[in-house]
Image (spheres, rainbow, N blue to C red):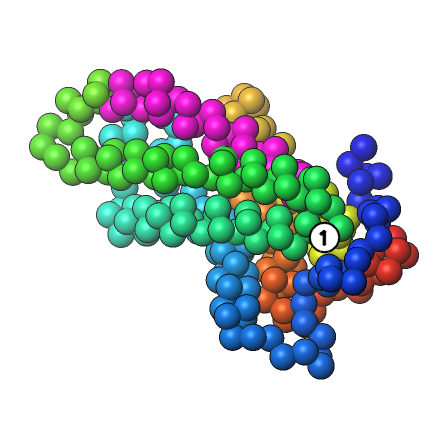
Amino acid sequence: MILSAFGRSSRPATLNEHTSDSPTPDEKMPGYERLWRLVLAVAIVGGPLGYDVGSILIPAVHEDGATSIAANAAANPITNAVHLVAYVLASFLLPLGAVGLAYLAYARAPWPATIGGLLAVVGWLPFSALTALDDLTMAMAALPDSGSYATLLDQFANDAVMGGYLLVYIVGHLVAYVLLAVALRRAGVIPRWAAWSMIASSPLTVAVFVLPGRPLVLGDVALTLLVIGSVPAARAMAGLPGITRSAERARSGCV
């Protein structure tokens, strides 16, 4: 059960494990550690944020070739370019952020952290290919007689390679954030509300494609929840103060 998994891990932390993953006031963080912590902290929250911004601005979501090309041709070129830039940035940051989340939870929840981290990295790697597909659609929309490329776009987007990328992306990242949220909560890194925000993002994303009418706004809500839930983890990774009282109580075994 997910709720029972939110309890404290029964495995005691050893002396060489980071139980808080943040330096104490008496510790001076080495420069190299501060650098990679800041990079991972930015990736933890910046990856979902870039994905969220890009998804809000995207002209078409999983439409056929003709509809996608027409939507890109009619879209504001500035907002469409911002959507593409946000996706490109997210494609680099999301796998790094997944590594950071797994690292934060590993000491007290090694199995869900390991499995969730691996699934997240593998699931996010195809995001670059899917972003390139958006770039291709935008390039086709800018050509004369752009509608003539619809069949080619459909063949490319629906072939075995792109279909495989899409399947790995969907299954990998949706399952991963449930496991990582459980692991982070068990480790006392994030508060309960942040864990539930991460978990809720996965079923909401699925709901976009199974509910009648494809309510795309649910996808934007899901990504926003993922951004919000990632903020406490990013703060913990950066070594900043502000880990909530509930997270501190989780570490001491009071939750």
Helix, strand or loop status at disc 1: loop
Closest to the observer, 87 or 72: 87
Rendered position, 173 above or below 92:
above
Count of marks placed on residues: 1
Q: Is residue 110 visible?
A: yes
Q: Residue at x 67, y 67 (%)?
A: 22
Q: Residue at x 68, y 49 (%)?
A: 106
Q: Residue 223, image x and y in percent?
A: 54, 44
Q: Which residues are magenta?
A: 153-181
Q: Residue at x 86, y 46 (%)?
A: 10
Inspect the magenta stretch and tell me whether residue 30 lies in it. Answer: no
Q: Residue 70, image x and y in percent?
A: 25, 30
Rendered position, 127 above or below 10:
above
Left or right, residue 218 beside residue 1: left
Closest to the observer, 238 or 191: 238
Closest to the observer, 62 or 74: 62
Closest to the observer, 111 or 125: 111
Residue receiving disc 1:
107
